[in-house]
Amino acid sequence: VFRSLPLEHQRKLFDLINDIEQKALLLSELEEYMFLDLIDHLSIDESVEIFTHMPADDVADLISKLPQEKADQILRKMNTEDSEEVEELLRYDRDTAGGIMVPDFIALREISTAREAIESIQKDYHDVEMPFYLYVVDESDHLLGVVSLRQLVVVKPNTPLKDFMTRDIFSVRTDTDQEEVAKLGARYDILAVPVVDEQNRLVGIVTVDDVIDIFRREATEDILKMAGVGEDFVETQ
């Protein structure tokens, strides 16, 4: 419904939404031209407040679409920790795994027990976007394996992660094209794909919602091209 409204009515409706998280969700779902038109009438402080309720990967994606001056103003006003996460993501190309990954994930050492892992999730990772996978890393954050939430609750509490983690784990590099990431996630039917740097250090994950978005965008582009719509129009979408 929001997409079908004239810009003036979109702005009025957006202002009527009191829940900041709902505003954040709406912004992240809009096409680029709608997002730019809508945020143009928001103050820097309003924009910052909304962005603080978004995952870092969504913020990075949206900020990358803004004029450089406005983007810099927003980043300067954001919480230091949040802005550093966003700036780190902005280093990567938008169409790569690094550009769409979420920098928040659960990672523990292989000597941790199932009980310690569950306690850590409850204490330190209760607000992560993807709580279904726990990644196992060494002292240098190299990716060693993965444990599902189901595995954690069915093994004996004192069992170390190294005894039941899946070692045959696939991952993608930060420079992997986003289409390849999406195909990998779909092929293995998983909820998140781990992203590593050139030293195989875990730096983020690409979640299933981003995979779906990639397929949706690619399908839209294919349909528009089949209809003979110009490349310039495809890019604006």
Image (cartoon, helix red, strand yellow):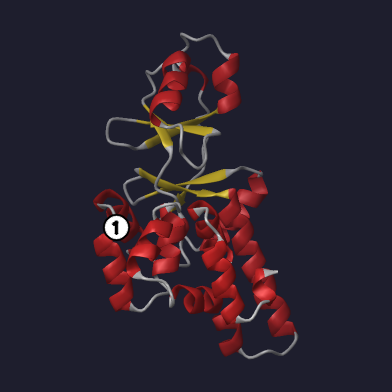
Task: Evaluate whether residue 213 shows in this view.
Answer: yes
- Residue 175 in view (yes/no): no
Residue that appears at 24% across and 52% down: 80
Specify the quadrant of the image occupied by residue 142.
top left
Q: How many marks?
A: 1
Task: Decide: is 206 above or below 225.
Answer: above
Quadrant in the rendering for residue 215: bottom right
Furthest toward the right, the residue is: 227
Q: Residue at x 39, y 64 (%)?
A: 46
From the viewer's perspective, tell me whether residue 89 is left or right of residue 134. left
Quadrant assignment, res 153:
top right
Compared to residue 68, the image places residue 117 above or below, namely: above
The N terminus is located in which quarter?
A: bottom right
Along the line of sight, which residue is nearer the eye, 34 or 93?
34
Circle 1 sits on which residue? 78
**Quick one: SS at disc 1?**
loop
Q: Residues within 10 Å of mark 1 (few under 14, many from 20)?
A: some
Q: Position of residue 170 (x, y in %)?
A: 51, 43
Q: Position of residue 90 (x, y in %)?
A: 35, 64
Q: Tell me the quadrant of the picture where the C terminus can be found.
A: bottom right
Residues 87 and 182: in front is 87
- Residue at position x 55%, y 55% in the image: 22
The residue that appears at 44% across and 76% down in the rendered structure is: 41
Q: Amino acid at mark 1?
A: Met
Q: Name the spot of residue 129 as percent of width and height, x first.
A: 50, 42
Judge left or right: residue 237 versus residue 39.
right
Counting from the top left corner in percent of width and height, residue 38 is at 50, 75
Q: Nearer the viewer, residue 50 or 223?
A: 50
